[in-house]
Structures are given as structure tokens and as C-alpha cells.
Image: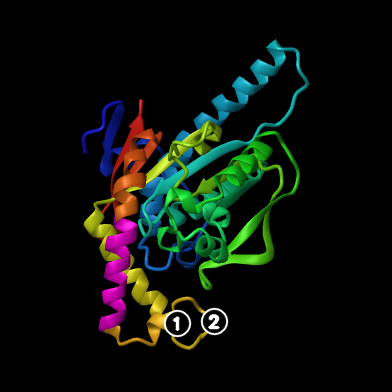
Amino acid sequence: MEAQGYFEFKREDWQNLAKRAELPLTTQQLTDIKALNDQISLEDVQDVYVPLVRLLQKKYADFEKWNRDKLDFLQLPVKKTPFIIGISGSVAVGKSTTARLLQELLSSWFTSLKTQLITTDGFLYPTAELKRRNILNRKGFPESYDMKSLIKFLSDVKSGKKEIKVPKYSHQVYDIVENEFDTIDQPDILIVEGINVLQLPANETIYVSDFFDWSIYVDADANLIEQWFLERFGVLLDTAFHDPTNYYYKYAKLPRSEAFEMAHKIWRDINLKNLEEFILPTRFRADIILHKTTGHVMDNILVRV
């Protein structure tokens, strides 16, 4: 991968940057954390995520020192400013696993810090609104998000606002859940995960990434991501078969070959197009690129230097 401004580490070199740690989770807990068809082991956590968290620890210490020194110089009252991490990448690449695992490690190792996680799915327009705008087939593309609300949310977080409500998104019904919310309440560290977090929409003057203090892009070859997307689709069909309220129920009742033909079309016409036009071009805006290969194995780590 050609990446100007980055230093690329092979996994075997990256894992030697930090001492082996006693991991705060079991194999079962890791299974509960990972996304549906993602593959990750405790050895992966040790090799990739332990050095990542150690580097993040240094970044956070610098961030805190800068904020203290800045307020002291300006003779302003001391206040807590949340450290925000953005995590981006394609649909089905495993960014949710990375986000949840980081939250677990940070919460376990740094108990004095409050770490919360939010996804940008809650800022998608509801299905009814997408239909009204005639962009339901563009769900996941930049125009399908309420960017004004997302920007306001991040601004509120940075300013220290208490108990910020975020609409809850359900992957079971594939829509915003009416009158249900997640609450972000003055975290020390906030992880924001979503396909759109590093994008620069042409009609915006402030970008989501303007609020980030660190960012990660989870990367893989598009052919591999397609394979993982189809594998995940198969798992979702199996779980939806006896649940008429599930979004995937209508696909689960189809002949398997017909359902997967639909999935191939969704990947080709929506997800691949979105990846190539809007997601992949943001890769080199991230501070860290975690590259995955066959079997979801992280083989290379790129660090902006």
C-alpha cells in the first residue's frame, strides 16, 4: 500500500512495540464483543490492540497536557475536554469490533476514565424520511445522514454538555427506533464509529473529523470485504428466519440462491459504490490504518508520522 506520510509496520514488528499484557477479557467475552462474522482471537488483541492502546495512552497524555497548559496560559478556568476517537471503514470490514474492543480495553485498563461509544447509525434519517426524499436506495451515502445533528452532537460533547440524547438505531428493523435513545454523558473518551466519519461533504463548513483527536481506518481489499459482507448476510438470514419483525425476514423466506443474488446486487450497486466513491478516499485522512487480510487477520499497521 502506497501511503505517503505513514510508517508501515508488519504485524510481527508492531507487536514488539509493547510488552505483553494481562488481557482483561476471556475468549467468550471477546466473542460477545466481535461483530457477527468477524474473526478475532486473544492473540490478535495481544499483538495488535495492546500496542495500539499504549500509543493511544501517550496521545491522550499529550492531549491532556496541552489542554491544561492552554487554559493556564489563557488564565481560564480548568475544564474537562473529551478526547474523541473516530473509527471508519467499509460496511462489513470489522470497524464495530475495533470500536467495541477499544472501549473494553480502555475501560478496563484506565478505570478512572469514562469511555463511551456511539455509532453514526443513529444519525441516519429514518426510513420514512429517506422515502420522502426519494433516497432510500442511497442509504449509507452522505446525503442519507442528518449531518447537522451529528455536528451539533459532537460540538455538545466537546463543550461538556451533560446527558446528550442520541437516536437509537436497530439493525434488526433496519431503522431508527422511535422514542429510544442512547445517552452520552460527559465522557473522558468518546469513540465515534461509522462509515462517514472522515468524509468532507461539499455542502458543510464544519466536518465531523474536525472534532477528532485521533482517528482509525479499518482497511481491506474490496473483494475480501464483499466476501465478509455475504458471509454476514448469511448469518443474518439464519437469525431472521423465524422473526417476521426482522428486516432480513423477507430475504430469509426466499430461496437461498435468490436471496444471495439480491445480496450481490446490494453490494455491487450500493456498498461497493459507496466504498469507492466516498469511504476509501478518506483512508489517508486517518492517523492509524489497520489493514486486514484473509480471515480478518490484521497484517499491517500504518501510523501517520
Up the image or down, 268 lies above or below 66; here it is below
Task: Report the coloring of the rendering.
Answer: rainbow
Label 2 to label 1: alpha-carbon separation: 7 Å
In-image side of 238 versus 256 (left or right): right
Q: Nearer the viewer, residue 217 or 115?
A: 217
Residue 271 falls within the magenta-colored stretch: yes
In percent of width and height, residue 183 lies at 69, 53
User: Would you say the magenta stretch is mainly helix, strand or loop?
Assistant: helix
Q: Which residue is mark 2?
A: 245
Residue of label 1: 249
Residue shown at 51% from the left, 58% from the top: 133
Q: Residue at x 34, y 59 (%)?
A: 270
Residue 198 lies in quadrant: top left
Instruction: Judge by depth and name the residue closer to the eye, 59 or 177.
Output: 177
Q: Which residues are magenta?
A: 257-272
111 relative position to 75: left or right:
left
Relative to 200, say whether 97 is above or below: below
Check disc 1 and report its element: helix, strand or loop: helix
Identity of the residue drawn at 36% across and 39% down: 282
